[in-house]
Structure formats: structure tokens, C-alpha cells
Image (tube, helix red, strand yellow):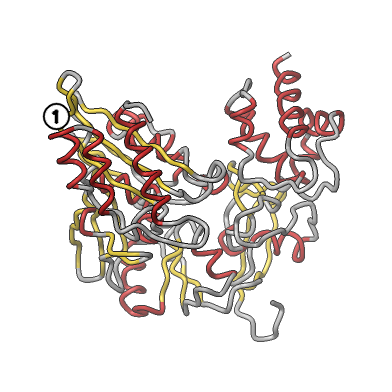
Amino acid sequence: MELPDESTADIACILNGEPIRARVPLRQNLVDWLRHGVGLTGSHVGCEHGVCGACHVQVDGVVVRGCLMLAVQADRATVETIEGATSSGRIRALQDAFFNRAALQCGFCTPGMLLQAAELLAKNSDPTREEIRQALSGNYCRCTGYHAIVDAVQAAAASLRA
Amino acid sequence: MKPARFDYACPGTLGGALALLAEQGPEASILAGGQSLMPMLNLRMARPALLVDINRIPGLDAITLLDGVLTIGARARHADVLTSPLVQQAAPLLIQALHHVAHPAIRNRGTLGGSLALADPAAEMPACVTCLGATLVLASASGERRVPAASFFLGVYATALEHGEMILRVEIPAIRPGWIHAFLEVSRRHGDYAMAGLALAIRRDGAHVAEASIALCGVESATRRQTEAEAALVARGVDAACDRFAHLDAMGGAEITAAHRIHLARVLLRRAVGAQD
């Protein structure tokens, strides 16, 4: 990807609240730039074809697959990764609930799960278990069997309503 | 798993995009939501010389309802169509179907026009616009033309789009009084590709089905109006309509046989019409 004659473009965006400028290879996807170009390794790279959800990041306020968007398309966008969502505290209730319910084992899927669950709770403060499963249907977890994750999202929703 | 090299253009106007498409011909690919193109690039199943990113062209995502016609811009994101009160009012079939389209993060980016242009046989949107008698408005550097959905889908990933053309918008006749929409689907897990899906619009006269429009996804290689089954449904009821599905040219495959897809199409039709399975 970093070949000397690689075609590149210059981008400027807001990343986790801070303006950033970068030169990115045209064919580099967003999550690879975040990990290798910026050093934000909280977003994970799993399937690289839009199936697993490990690479979820938020772009202009909505959760997207970081492997299905080019880095160059982030020009002029507002991007938030799991690092930004964590430091702002906006997903704290979910993170606490995942910890308390042991809703993770290896943790590879967790950043993507948290961002998608946060988007659900922003729209629906009291989702059913079925609604949670549908919202997370595009996020693969190979450890937990999902039950504890659904429990944790429900618990977080309850704590946010309290 | 990274894409091969490509050039990238992000024109700010429709005219600019169409000029690039005319110039590059089959070497150019349109990048809209990217939710199918990006996987194909990553897998190197697609190797375009140029990506024409249409995400900065103003107005391509507008949704309007005027004089009984619902118009949806080609770049309208699935998530925006799904939550549009105009779509809910004029084409509830789309709302029902969009719940089956992939997952929230994909719907946040994926577009109606992208789904129609790709023409995946398992995709829900081609069946819906066919069922609803929509018209696709296509644009190229030499002008616009209008293609009925019923003659747009030609086969697996094959459409009436010519090189240099892109979908501009979709015009859907708004639902009329007395009509009901239903979209049903069977897939392995929520959001997976349809093993079979059914788009249905019917008008009842008492218990009798007076008019019907049926289109399937995940069954035949190109979605189409199931006119024989529609006629049978109106003339003789759901059993007769299910009989007509024996003539479907269903896709085969090691995992899901043609016979199984036809079985599922019948199950879905019975459910949708309200008969017992």
C-alpha cells in the first residue's frame, strides 16, 4: 500500500473532535488509515468485505463499516472511533454493562458492538431483545454466543433510563 | 485483501460525473454507498480503472411525493428511505422490505440506486420497484431516458444500464386506496441474503383478491412481475397462484435447491395473502 508510486490524495477531517490533515493512498480504506496512518488501533479489521462489523466507526453521525469506505471519502467528514467515543464518555453505560456482564471474551468484536449498540440506544431507549439482536445482526462475535451481549445492552438501556 | 489500484474522481456536479462516465466507458465504476462495490474491490472481483464517487453531487438523495408519484433519488441511503414518512405513506412495501436489507451500518451507507444498479438476484429493492410498477430515470452525457422497472432487470448483475449511464431517480406510483402491501422473506439469519422473498401489492373486494402484483427475489435470476401467478390469484385463489410457481425458472445451487426456493415462494405467498400455510 505504501509503494513509492502509489496514487494519493490529501484529506482534511475532524477525527475524534480534532482537525487532522493527511495524505492517503487512493485505495486505502478508512479503517486501515485509522489504524496504520493515525495509529488508532481500537477499530479492528476482520473480514474486509463488510460482513463482520469489527471495523465499525462513526462518520458524520452514523455508524459505518470502516472497510467499506475509502479513506479519501472521509475528506471533510466528522469521524469518531471507539477511542473518541470512549474518551467523550458517551458510551460509558454500555462499556460498564459489557464489563459487568462479561459480554466479551477476546474483545475483538467489542468496539464495533459498542458503537452499533450506542446507535440503537440513541434511537430506542427501551429495545426488546429481538430489536437488540436485529441491530447487532451485522456484528459477529465468535466467543460469547451473543446472550451476554444482549443482556448487557438491555442493562445499559435500563441504567440510562433510570 | 486490498483493492487493486484505481484512479478516483469526486465530481461536484452531475454533468461532471456523466462526462467522466462517457469518457471512461466500461473502465469506470460509480461509487455510491459502496456496500457491494467495496467488497468486490477488496476481493479484486472488480478492477475498475476509475471510481466516480457521486457522494458530493447535490440533490441525488432527495425524496419527494407529488401528484401521486413518490420520487426517490438514486443516492438515497437505505436508512433514510426506511425512516421517510413520505415513503411510509406512499410505498409501505419499501419500509417492510428494508428491514430485511443487510444491517444498520450497511443501511447507513447503502443506496437505493446502488442496489438497483447491481441487480443482485437476492436483493429486495429490485423486487419491490418491479412489484410497484416503478419507472427508473437514467442519465448519460447524451440525456435522460425512462425505463420501466419491469424491463430493467435482465439477469444476475445484468440490467438495461448502458456504459456511461447512471440511475438518477426512481418514480413510484403512490399506493392507491384499498391496496395493501406486504413484503416477506426467508433467510438464514436476519439481514442475510434472501433464500426467497416476496413483494406483494393487492386490492381486495371483500374476501376476494380483485387485483394483485407479485415479484420475487432470491428465486429467479432476474426479478419480474409474476403475471401468471397474479392472474391465477385473482381468478382462482392462492392455491392456483401457488401452482403457477411450478413454472418458475428458479436458481439452483448446492446449498439451496431450485425446488426449495419454489417451496419457499409458495409459503410466502400463502402467508402474505393471509391463507394458512
Give left or right: position of B24 versus B246.
right
x and y, in percent, of residue B155 in the image: 32, 64
Q: Is residue B160 above or below residue B183?
A: below
Q: Quadrant of residue B70?
A: top left
Q: Quadrant of residue B183?
A: top left
Give left or right: position of A74 versus A160.
left
Secondary structure found at label 1 = strand
Q: Is residue B232 above or below residue B74?
A: above
Neighbour tally class for label 1: few under 14, some 14-19, many 20 plus, Cα within 10 Å:
some
x and y, in percent, of residue A37 in the image: 75, 65
Residue at 26% in and 48% down:
B130
Q: Is residue A152 above or below residue B150?
A: above
In the rendered image, the residue lying farthest to the top is A162
Give left or right: position of A62 versus B270.
right
Give whichever of B152, B188 is nearer the camera.
B188
Q: Which residue is under mark 1?
A: B210
Quadrant for the C terminus of chain B in the image: top left
Give left or right: position of B96 versus B192.
left
Number of numbered discs visible in the structure rendering: 1
Q: Quadrant of residue B121?
A: bottom left
Q: Is residue B42 above or below residue B63?
A: below
x and y, in percent, of residue B18 in the image: 32, 68
x and y, in percent, of residue B83 in the image: 43, 33
Question: Label 1 is placed on what type of residue?
Answer: Ala
Residue at 71% in and 46% down:
A112
Quadrant for the N terminus of chain B in the image: bottom right
In the rendered image, the residue lying farthest to the bottom is A5
Residue at 29% in and 32% down:
B181
- Chain of the residue that carries numbered disc 1 in the rendered image: B
